[in-house]
Image (cartoon, rainbow, N blue to C red):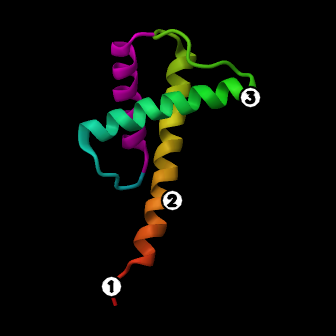
Amino acid sequence: MGVLGWIILGLVAGAIARMLHSGDEPGGLVGTLAVGVLGAMLGGLIAWAVGIGGISGFFSLGTWIIAFAGAFLVLAVYSALAGDSRSTHTAH
């Protein structure tokens, strides 16, 4: 998959993950792209490590599911880390 394919996959996977995730993540379009691409790479790595496949072709349903799952995981981890840092810095 080429660079344009990764950008499109990242934007779509990141946008879907952000729509379904209940957190409040900053970043706009660039943040959505970063979440999606990072999620696709992380999801592909995890899927490969457990032996269920990985990121293959752009038009593969498995690629899209793995990318979305990875993006959702990235958002969940971000929210957990950001939530912890926000709760320790509250004003009195």
What type is the residue that disc 1 sits on?
Answer: Ala
Instruction: Give the mark nearest the N terminus, 1 or 3.
Output: 3
**Magenta segment boundaries in residue numbering:** 1-21
Task: Please report the residue visible at 65 percent of the width from the left and 31 percent of the height from the top.
Answer: 46
Q: Mark 3 = which residue?
A: 50
| Residue 40: % across, % down | 49, 28
Within the image, what quadrant is residue 66 found in?
top right
Q: Point out the image quarter for the C terminus.
A: bottom left
> What is the spatial separation of the Cα atoms under label 1 and label 3, in whole angstroms?
44 Å
Compared with 65, 20 (above or below) is below
Q: Secondary structure at mark 1?
A: loop
Instruction: Specify which label sits upstream in the sequence, 2 or 1.
Output: 2
Query: Residue reaching furthest front?
Result: 3
Disc 2/disc 1 C-alpha distance (Å): 20 Å
Q: Secondary structure at mark 3?
A: helix
Q: Which mark is residue 91?
A: 1
* Residue at image coords 56%, 12%: 56
Look at label 2 and name its amino acid.
Answer: Ala
Residue at 68% from the left image edge and 23% from the top image edge:
48
Q: Please tell me whether residue 23 is drawn above or below residue 9 in the rendered image.
A: below
Q: Secondary structure at mark 2?
A: helix
Q: Is residue 9 magenta-colored?
A: yes
Q: Label 2 neighbourhood size at 10 Å, few (<14), some (14-19), many (20+)?
A: few
Per the rendering, the mark at residue 80 is 2
Query: Residue 12 at x, y = what percent?
Result: 36, 27
Q: Which tag, 3 or 2, sits closer to the chain's start?
A: 3
> Seen from this angle, which residue lies furthest right?
51
